[in-house]
Image (cartoon, grey):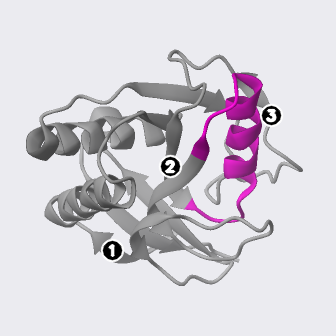
């Protein structure tokens, strides 16, 4: 893996998440019946940060849940045919709620598809929206994000690495070139 460029630093990540939080509130005409669901791993702290931003300007703390699936990510060496749901129990009720699914990188769409399966196995939400920090293209399924921090056109031999303080000890988004 060869470092190519830094895409977002800590301040840029924060600005993107503040903007996404404002867009969520605006599109949903407030925060009534909203639930944030982060895809483990990095979608969970991103969902929690979006909740904090919404709390700061709406004075309402939204419920945050998580969904645990085997991620089909571009930084895995082995390609999976489809993600496997490890734990599809969502900690809060999503029945008749507006669910905002949160993830770090949208690539092929397979991770999101597995998360949609997990969500609908837990009840029938009124709607499901998707928020991602990075959309890098190359969809294999008809899935698009409603809220995007940054669109980053990539080639198949590139990898996006999202690092978050809660997991990685720093906040940054970088792009790498795969060797070979």
Q: Position of residue 125 (x, y in %)?
A: 62, 34
Tell me which residue sits at (80%, 65%) in the image. Answer: 141
- The residue tagged 1 is 7
Q: Are marks 1 and 2 in contact (CB under 8 Å)?
A: no
- The residue tagged 2 is 103
Magenta-colored stretch includes residue 114: yes
Q: What are the residue bounds of the magenta stretch?
A: 106-127
Residue nearest the viewer, comparing 94 with 80? 94
Residue nearest the viewer, comparing 46 with 93? 93
Q: Are marks 2 and 3 in contact (CB under 8 Å)?
A: no
Quadrant showing the C terminus: bottom right
Q: Position of residue 159 (x, y in %)?
A: 56, 68
Pair 3/1: label in front: 3
Q: Earlier in the sequence, mark 1 or mark 2?
A: 1
Q: Position of residue 42 (x, y in %)?
A: 45, 41
Residue, far right: 81
Q: Are marks 3 and 1 in contact (CB under 8 Å)?
A: no
Residue nearest the viewer, comparing 78 with 84? 84
Dot 1 falls on a residue whose secondary structure is strand
Circle 2 packing at 10 Å, graded few (<14), some (14-19), many (20+), is: many
Circle 3 packing at 10 Å, graded few (<14), some (14-19), many (20+), is: some
- The residue tagged 3 is 84
Q: Is residue 149 left or right of residue 55?
A: right
Pair 1/2: label in front: 2
Circle 1 packing at 10 Å, graded few (<14), some (14-19), many (20+), is: some
Q: Report, in whole angstroms, how far the alpha carbon at label 2 lies from the one at label 3.
A: 16 Å
Tell me which residue sits at (73%, 32%) in the image. Answer: 120
């Amino acid at each position: 893996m060869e470092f190519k460029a830094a895409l977002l630093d800590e301040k840029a990540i924060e600005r993107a998440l503040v903007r996404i939080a404002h867009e969520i509130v605006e599109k949903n005409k407030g925060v009534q019946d909203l639930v944030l669901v982060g895809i483990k791993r990095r979608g969970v702290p991103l969902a929690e940060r979006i909740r904090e931003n919404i709390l700061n300007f709406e004075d309402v703390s939204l419920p945050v849940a998580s969904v645990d699936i085997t991620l089909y990510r571009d930084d895995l060496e082995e390609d999976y045919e489809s993600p496997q749901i490890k734990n599809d129990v969502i900690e809060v009720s999503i029945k008749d709620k507006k669910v905002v699914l949160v993830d770090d990188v949208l690539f092929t769409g397979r991770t999101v598809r597995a998360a949609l399966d997990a969500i609908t196995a837990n009840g029938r939400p009124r709607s499901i929206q998707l928020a991602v920090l990075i959309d890098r293209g190359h969809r294999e399924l008809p899935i698009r994000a409603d809220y995007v921090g940054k669109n980053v056109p990539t080639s198949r031999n590139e990898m996006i690495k999202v690092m978050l303080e809660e997991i990685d000890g720093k906040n940054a988004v970088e792009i790498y070139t795969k060797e070979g």
